[in-house]
Image (spheres, rainbow, N blue to C red):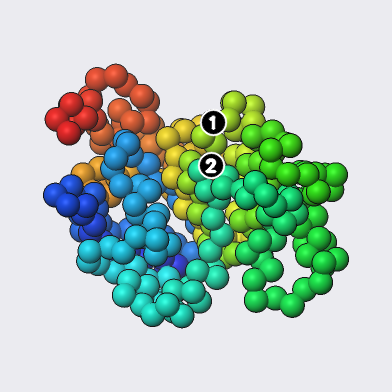
Amino acid sequence: MTMSTQIKIKGLSKAFGEKVVLDNLDLDIPKGKSIAVIGASGTGKSVLLKCVLGLIEADQGSITVDGVETLGASRQTREDVLKKFGMLFQGGALFDSLKIWENVVFRYRQGKNLNLAELRDAAEQALADVNLEPRVMDLYPAEISGGMQKRVALARAVVDRPEILLFDEPTTGLDPITSGVINRLIRSAVDRLGATAITISHDMTSIRAIADDVAMLHGGRVIWKGPVGDMDQTDNPILDQFVHGYAEGPLTRYAEQA
């Protein structure tokens, strides 16, 4: 069965001054697939994600979501497209002055005429989905651990059941045990929602746990794309060095010349 493409990126380019970050990049992301975007630091992974979200305007190219062009689109069109997305930011990005339940429903409540009980019910269910008990709802972010904060951020990302989920370095700063918990919760959320997912990560353990497919960025383009299980048998020397963390190889020479 052929899967439809939900996000289609064609000829995407972005430069900052003389620094070319994305160079005529092409990438198709099938509906319902979880894809990890990997690559060395500075290869444009975060810039790609921000272009998809419209936080950065690309210099040229095309990004369509369900067939709707987003580059150069009107504000209303962008807002309509963004309703499909849920985002887990690298640092969690919780609001310190809001209680946990208020953080979870911060975006969910926009444009909805819901009373306090309905909002709290939605927050409680979303927190339960990430294995957090109701007792945390009236705490503030500073009163819970880093791992719990990440779970709250995940609850916020999925509370309105988005079609597309974006994860930016979801396990950064977490210990291996907590990272494993977050990986399982993310995979569970993606499967439960049937969502399309894009994950940016340097953590190969996370990538193997979360992703169906992998796309590697290098030199501003996708140089390899395939199932996550094929990474270890690749004959691509750049991907091979990155996946296995070898000290010597083409990425080392590239970094020295950058």
Q: Earlier in the sequence, mark 2 or mark 1?
A: 2
Q: Is residue 75 left or right of residue 62?
A: right
Q: Which mark is residue 21?
A: none
* Front-lying residue, 186 or 48: 48
Q: Are marks 2 and 1 in contact (CB under 8 Å)?
A: yes
* Front-lying residue, 177 or 207: 177
Q: Residue at x 50, y 54 (%)?
A: 166
Q: Is residue 10 left or right of residue 64?
A: left
Point out the residue furthest to the top here.
Answer: 247
Q: Which residue is mark 2?
A: 91
Viewer can see residue 140: yes
Q: Amino acid at mark 2?
A: Gly
Q: Residue at x 34, y 52 (%)?
A: 47
Q: Quadrant of the C terminus?
A: top left
Q: Is residue 188 left or right of residue 28?
A: right
Q: Which residue is mark 1?
A: 173
Q: Is residue 181 above or below residue 75?
A: above
